[in-house]
Amino acid sequence: MVRLGQAALAAALIAGCARVPAGQPAASPAPLFTPTAPPTHAASFTPSAPIPPTSPPVPTVSPTPPPTPDGTITRGPYLQSPTSDSIVIVWETDRPMSGEVIYGRGGAYDHRLVSPGDDRRHEVRLTGLEPGTVYGYWVATSGYPLSEAGSFRTAPLPEDPSFTFVAYGDSRSGHTVHRQIADAILALKPDFSMHTGDLVARGRSSAEWDRFFELEAGLLASVPLFPSPGNHEGNDRRYFDAFVLPGNERWYTFDWGNARLISLQIDAIMPFGKQSEQVQWLEATLAANTQPWLIVLFHVPPYDALPEDTMGDAVRINLVPLFERYGVDLVLSGHNHNYQRSIVNGITYIVTGGAGAELDFIAGPDPDTEAFYNGHHLVHFSVDGSTLTAQAIALDGTIVDEFTLEASNLP
């Protein structure tokens, strides 16, 4: 992630970004501010007589600086819903302000997109981007930088099937561990991350959401997040207000390279019976898949080594048969505050709920359990064509589990 101070950003703004109407990228660079013309320097010479006292002095000229904004950013900027040719950049300020995103690739910040109207929250969708390409950006108001410079990568196309991502979950109110997890993910520089739910302890608490975004500020500015709601989100509007996700935001799908990823709302609140809208959508989405990799994300796991609960039973009855019928490769869940890996009928099930909440300790594995770890952690995935390699990484950097999968949906 590239970081520049505000003074440097302001200088870059003056140097090379064109003003354009709202929603339109700049066609070519142009200065934002037009300073008074620079002085003309005469050629060097040795005068034979004193310069007349009436000669005008050579003026000193400096560019007019951009105006200092009246407000500041209170949340963000953070990256949402990247595709191969678009991304959404979100931020909030402490008062209504104009907003714009300055962006470009190859070190040239030569495009601007203006957010319509003055508001406290801005959601700017950049379009017409190149697949699998790194862009730099920052957000501004009336030409003045509000944020440091960040960067993002657009999703690659299926013919570019190499990428990385991270899964983690159940951050809740374990703020010290949560910050360590966020810093560790940022150091790994994945293309995107996935949260298995229970982002906060109380979804109805605005203060807890503010704290979540504060702890993840550096991460979310350069790594897009795809979350799945947990029971602690409580189906609260604050979750859906915070994120800009595909589809109806409760259940959605997106492609990255040669993978199709699906997120569900399995949180003890939203119905997921066999005839429910959610499961009908899931089956249609699975049936339509043409990607080699098929990965599903949701909160409550169907398999775990803790005592049984009725929610896990319902997941096994209603969802697992679909996973097996349509060749799902990997299922990511949380809810249990530990790490577990199970293999059932050829599908790998991961529980990653160790991003901050108080730990749940497993005394011993179930028959299907391949590995487990009673500690805080994240899981890092690397896809290279038809091979996926994963590492469960503890807070101290120790690799507590590692495995490799081969895609099951190859042509």
Image (cartoon, rainbow, N blue to C red):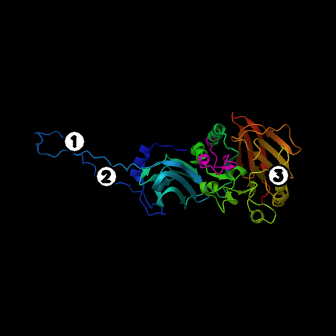
Q: Which is in the foreground here, disc 3 or disc 2?
A: 3
Please name whichever residue, 30 or 254, is drawn nearer the observer in this view of the structure.
Answer: 254
**Residue 35 circle label:** 2
Which residue has dot 1 on it?
44
Q: The N terminus appears in which quarter of the rendering?
A: top right
Span highlighted in magenta in the image:
186-209
Q: CA distance from mark 2 to mark 1?
A: 26 Å
Q: Is 397 drawn above or below residue 268 in the view shown?
A: above
Q: Is residue 347 above or below residue 281?
A: above
Q: Position of residue 358 (x, y in %)?
A: 72, 39
Q: Position of residue 114 (x, y in %)?
A: 47, 59
Q: Is residue 110 left or right of residue 39?
A: right
Give the x, y percent position of residue 324.
84, 58
Mark 2 or 1, nearer chain start: 2
The kind of secondary structure element at disc 1 is: loop
Amino acid type for the residue under numbered disc 3: Gly
The kind of residue tagged 2 is Pro
How far apart are labels 3 and 1 at the CA level?
85 Å
- Whether tag 3 and tag 1 are in contact, CB under 8 A, the answer is no
